Amino acid sequence: MRDWATRHLPPSPTPLRLLECGCGNGTLLLSFLTSPSSSRPQPFHLTGIDYSPGAIFLAKGVETAHRSAPLEDEAVRNEVDVDWRVGDILRDKFTEEWDLVLDKGTFDALALSSEPIDGEGEGRLPSRVYPEKVATLVREGGFFLITSCNFTEEEIRRRFTRPELGESDTVVALVPRLYPIQDLYISESFGRDLR
């Protein structure tokens, strides 16, 4: 996912804002502490949200370890601010928008729930509410990057590009081709040619 972002996010002198929904231990977000040496350093403001206080505690520890680790040979260090938050992506209200919103399995996990949620999406399943929430988090012209083990490209497209969600060209799906999950390919960019 970091490689995709490095290739497709436009360089900016101001920090690019990235959000990971369901960040867990934070390793995906923390991969943005560096960039390939073939590119220039890029400032980032990273936000990791997870409903588990334990996950956020762990992510903070992983961040400390990553920041003190020696730099890899083919990498440059980026200027990065990180904001770890305990929160509920389905129920919390957000007034912020991000350049790139990342999902590395959160939608898959939410889709397994048959328990309707309360609050704003009252009585609806998490898998119906989540695409609506994500659509409000991506700034105009921004991207939503998702990996899924449970859904095909067509299923992701149907769920995240409904007309009521706004611009369909903000969604980019990454779908596993084979196990393990690290073996990914860009299935399609809905409305944009980003290969």
Image (tube, rainbow, N blue to C red):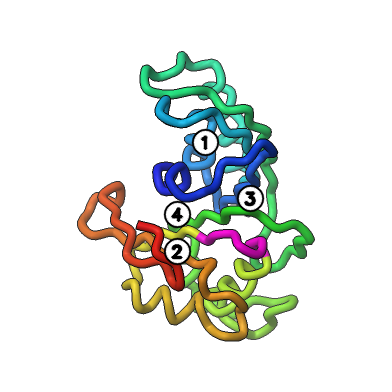
Residue drawn 54% across the image and 66% down it: 170
Instruction: First in sequence, mark 4 or 2: give its number.
Output: 4
Q: Nearer the viewer, mark 1 or mark 3?
A: 1
Where disc 2 sits, the SS reads strand
Instruction: First in sequence, mark 3 or 4: give its number.
Output: 3
| Residue designated by label 4 | 104
| Residue designated by label 1 | 32
Q: Is residue 5 in view? A: yes
Q: Nearer the viewer, residue 26 or 45?
A: 45
* Residue 194 is one of the magenta-drawn residues: no
Q: Nearer the viewer, residue 75 or 104?
A: 75
* Gap in angstroms between the C-alphas marked 2 and 3: 20 Å
| Range of magenta residues | 137-144
Cβ–Cβ below 8 Å for labels 4 and 2? no
Give the number of the disc on residue 172.
2
Q: What kind of residue is marked 1?
A: Phe
| Residue designated by label 3 | 49
Instruction: First in sequence, mark 4 or 1: give its number.
Output: 1
Instruction: First in sequence, mark 1 or 2: give its number.
Output: 1
* Gap in angstroms between the C-alphas marked 3 and 4: 12 Å
